[in-house]
Image (spheres, rainbow, N blue to C red):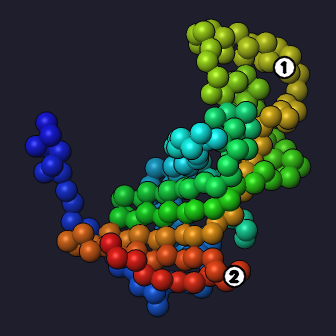
Amino acid sequence: MNRDIEDMRMNYTKGNLDEDSVLDNPIDQFKVWFEEATNSQILEPNALILATVNKNNIPSARTVLLKEIDPGGFIFYTNYRSEKGQDIADNNNVSMVFLWKEIERQVRISGIAEKIDPSRSEKYFHKRPKGSQIGAWVSPQSTIIESRAVLENKKREIEKKYQDHDQLPLPEFWGGYIVKPVAIEFWQGRPSRLHDRIRYALVDGSWKIERLAP
């Protein structure tokens, strides 16, 4: 088995990346790559790995979905009482990774996570399908439950309570975070593992563009 894993490899040949080809602002550059990923019919190109660190300096990572690209950063939504929400409350330095393997690209983002305005969260919450709104109320995310029946029973309770409503109120424990980047790295796979890595680093309020060794 281990020998088979050792032999797994690909030679990346689909593109290149250099300092002269990127835009001055990394969020603008991300928008270009994100559109290309979307047009490539990648399944959920907005899926990303979010890494946090808790108060005991133990890291944790999970997949979340990007919901908005803001001029100031990247927005996702979650239960504020979840594990990631508690981690961010203790340490709001986070990392995000987008992997678009079909086009041999990766984007790494380091930044500061902050809650967005509740009115903005409410606007998005009411755009979600009613079933998703119900789900937000039902799940005490990241807590231990006895069985799935706990969720099913709560779901029936919430459905009955709001059966005559098209929308549910925004839970006070649910909303969005914006990750304000301090560094963004764009990675393009290249042959022989000599990949292209272009990093934007925020220095004194301006973006510095630099190349990293693969």
Any mark on residue 1, and which? none
Q: Amino acid at mark 2?
A: Asp
Label 1: how many Cα within 10 Å (few below 14, some 14–19, many 20+): few
Q: Quadrant of residue 93?
A: bottom right
- Judged left or right of residue 10, residue 42 is right
Q: Give the quarter of the figure containing the C terminus.
A: bottom left
Q: Quadrant of residue 81?
A: top right
User: What's the CA distance linking mark 2 and mark 1?
Assistant: 53 Å
Asked if residue 158 is positioned above or below residue 179 in the image, the reply reads above
Residue pushed farthest bottom? 20
Q: Position of residue 52 (x, y in %)?
A: 58, 47
Residue 127 visible (yes or no)? no
Residue 148 visible (yes or no)? yes
- Judged left or right of residue 14, residue 184 is right
The first of marks 2 and 1 along the sequence is 1
Query: 14 or 191, which is in the foreground?
Result: 191
Q: Position of residue 168 (x, y in %)?
A: 85, 31
Tally of numbered tags: 2
Q: Are marks 2 and 1 in contact (CB under 8 Å)?
A: no
Q: Amino acid at mark 1?
A: Gln
Asked if residue 89 is positioned above or below residue 67 in the image, the reply reads above
The residue where tag 2 is placed is 204
Any mark on residue 163, and which? 1
- Judged left or right of residue 15, residue 165 is right
- Residue at the spot x=79%, y=12% of the render? 157
- Residue at the spot x=20%, y=71% of the render? 192
Label 2: how many Cα within 10 Å (few below 14, some 14–19, many 20+): few
Q: Position of residue 57 (x, y in %)?
A: 57, 44
- Residue at the spot x=73%, y=14% of the render? 154
Label 1: element kind: loop
